[in-house]
């Protein structure tokens, strides 16, 4: 008989997201602190900002309007760090009632749901250190809008993707390999190739004909084997620091030019375009009365749009854009 | 018998938009040049950039994909000016074929259309000088997708709205009064009160509970009396420089603080949010294969998002936000 998730299983998944938030914030604060103590050559030691740490805001359903009727979240944001210019690592665990159009698009019949997850975006100040995004979550249809209700159906989703401003092949390979390994350990239920492709397709700016970054993995609406999918989700979540921190440490001491910094600000504009025009989670959150500042923590601090810029041919900047237009198989 | 627009009438409207572009660009370059010669106290004369002028890009339908099959446009962009950090004044005049869902939402039966208009957004560097947007345009359904085809129906639309970062009552009154006067001259067919209300309703960020700026006028889908509506549209278009330039000249020599500049960058984030999440013209253009760089010239150059910022109570910054939450009747 297939595994039937119950409310206690949802509690267990949600507890994992909270625990992962603690570990990820601690891991990122450690890098931030190491960098602040010994910044790269672009930062004079005597003018370097001290290390920043995550600021926590607890919110509950009364801070949102609309479809959320219970539960809440723990938003953690870091800003103006020596290395981490802006980032957020948020968890939430809410009860709510689907709007009717949304309810119809998902399997099951009850409008009541519980949703929980972790969502993070990190925008380093240093243009050679990539931006990263990851999230892991579930949505479950409940028989009733209350704690302990029975679970009609549930689906898990998540993923992690990297958005470099300058492309280092070894970084891309490291990031993708980490998630390839995670997928391989659960190879009977998940496929890196499939999730990598899904990631490339999802994080795509149609109007630009460009991917947002160099991808990673993305999976969604996984309904079968929730117990096994939660194990995989833990594997992927636990891989996050391993996938990202070595890249950060490898690049953060390198020096960069003003032109590279400017290119980063310009590329960040594409990140904003994707999140505000296409990202389902962002738009769903904004339109259903989610907590705006928790949702929009994903936007970088400083961003630039200039008119009709094209990088010179054969420059590193042009190479990046070439890869964004034609996704690469990094672990071939 | 009511006036029946023909292709020559469309030519005439389009010629007006082109002529207005010339006048507006010249008017803005004059202010830019005056400022560069004698900048405010925030700009050291010896480090002031020289005056910028508009850069012109001509494009034709082959630069767009999708629904546009003929015609083209004249994009004019100014960047990195002493006063005008970024701005665009664009005209276009295109032939095309509506996608079927869009066609169904508009009166008439032919899928062929001609659309022409002028669209402008100006983002000054100086935080006491407001951002401004205006556009005037028509869409006409044609019997055939070619020059000289007969006109089945047409509608005119347009408007102008002001987005200050710091609120000066006399500026708001001047801007609104200018368009109130323009409306009064055509009072038998248009109403300032109605258009002002429409503007407040349209330029509204639902997720923030805030208007984008302090409004102005906005009208759309005006099908009756196209001859008279074009006269009114000329009146409103001709009012643009009168509505905006005196405000620019009044504020551009005032000194400002770093904190005021930072507040401007932060408020610009809201401008981006509106344009990418709500603006019909932007989203329609992006999704139907318009020329991306002409459409997104509306975005400011430098923008900032910081997490959960709220200005101190009773500050000028808080006063602005109060007015954005509760639109004011400026000419009462």
Image: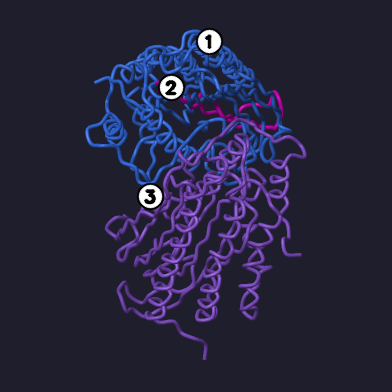
Chain colours: A blue, B purple
Q: Which residue is mark 2?
A: A126
Q: Quadrant of residue B192?
A: bottom right
Q: Residue at x 67, y 46 (%)?
A: B209
Q: Which residue is mark 3?
A: B293
**Nearer the observer, A102 or B274:** B274
Tell me if mark 3 has few (under 14), some (14-19) or many (20+) residues whose alpha carbon lies within 10 angstroms of its own. Answer: some
Residues shaded magenta:
A129-157
Against B42, residue B76 (above or below) is below
User: Disc 2 to disc 3, how far (Cα)?
Assistant: 27 Å
Query: Helix, strand, or loop for circle 1?
Result: helix
Does residue B74 appear in this view?
Answer: yes
Asked whether residue A145 is drawn in magenta, I would say: yes
Look at the image and say whether residue A20 sits in the magenta stretch. no
Q: Quadrant of the C terminus of chain A?
A: top left
Q: Chain of mark 1?
A: A
Q: Main secondary structure of the magenta part?
A: strand
Task: Please tell me whether residue A325 is drawn above or below residue A255 in the rendered image.
Answer: below
Q: Position of residue B4 (x, y in %)?
A: 46, 85
Q: Residue furthest left?
A: A314
Asked if labels 1 and 2 share a chain, the reply is yes
Give the residue at mark 1.
Answer: A33
Tell me the chain of label 2. A
Residues tagged 2 and 3 counted as in contact (Cβ below 8 A): no
Residue displayed at 59% across by 31% down: B306
């Amino acid at each position: 008989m297939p595994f039937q998730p119950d409310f206690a299983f949802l509690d267990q998944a949600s507890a994992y997201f909270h625990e992962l938030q603690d570990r990820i914030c601690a891991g990122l604060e450690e890098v931030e602190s190491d960098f602040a103590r010994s910044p790269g050559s672009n930062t004079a030691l005597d003018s370097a900002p001290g290390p920043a740490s995550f600021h926590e805001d607890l919110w509950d359903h009364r801070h949102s309007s609309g479809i959320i009727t219970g539960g809440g979240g723990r938003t953690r944001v870091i800003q103006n760090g020596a290395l981490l210019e802006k980032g957020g690592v948020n968890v939430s665990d809410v009860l709510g009632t689907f709007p009717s159009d949304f309810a119809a698009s998902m399997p099951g019949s009850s409008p009541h749901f519980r949703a929980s997850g972790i969502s993070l975006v990190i925008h380093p100040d240093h243009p050679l250190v990539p931006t990263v995004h990851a999230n892991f979550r579930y949505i479950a249809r409940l028989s009733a809008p209350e704690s302990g209700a029975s679970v009609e159906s549930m689906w898990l989703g998540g993923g992690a993707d990297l958005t470099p401003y300058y492309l280092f092949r070894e970084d891309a390979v490291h990031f993708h390999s980490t998630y390839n390994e995670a997928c391989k350990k659960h190879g009977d239920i998940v496929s890196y190739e499939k999730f990598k492709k899904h990631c490339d397709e999802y994080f795509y700016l149609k109007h630009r004909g460009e991917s947002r970054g160099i991808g990673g993995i993305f999976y969604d609406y996984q309904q079968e084997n929730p117990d096994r999918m939660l194990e995989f989700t833990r594997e992927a979540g636990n891989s996050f620091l391993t996938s990202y921190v070595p890249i950060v440490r490898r690049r953060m001491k390198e020096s960069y030019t003003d032109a590279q910094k400017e290119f980063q600000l310009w590329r960040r504009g594409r990140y904003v375009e994707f999140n505000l025009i296409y990202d389902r989670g962002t738009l769903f959150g904004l339109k259903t009365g989610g907590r705006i500042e928790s949702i929009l923590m994903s936007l970088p601090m400083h961003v630039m749009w200039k008119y009709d810029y094209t990088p010179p041919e054969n420059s590193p900047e042009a190479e990046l854009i070439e890869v964004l237009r034609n996704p690469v198989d990094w672990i071939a």
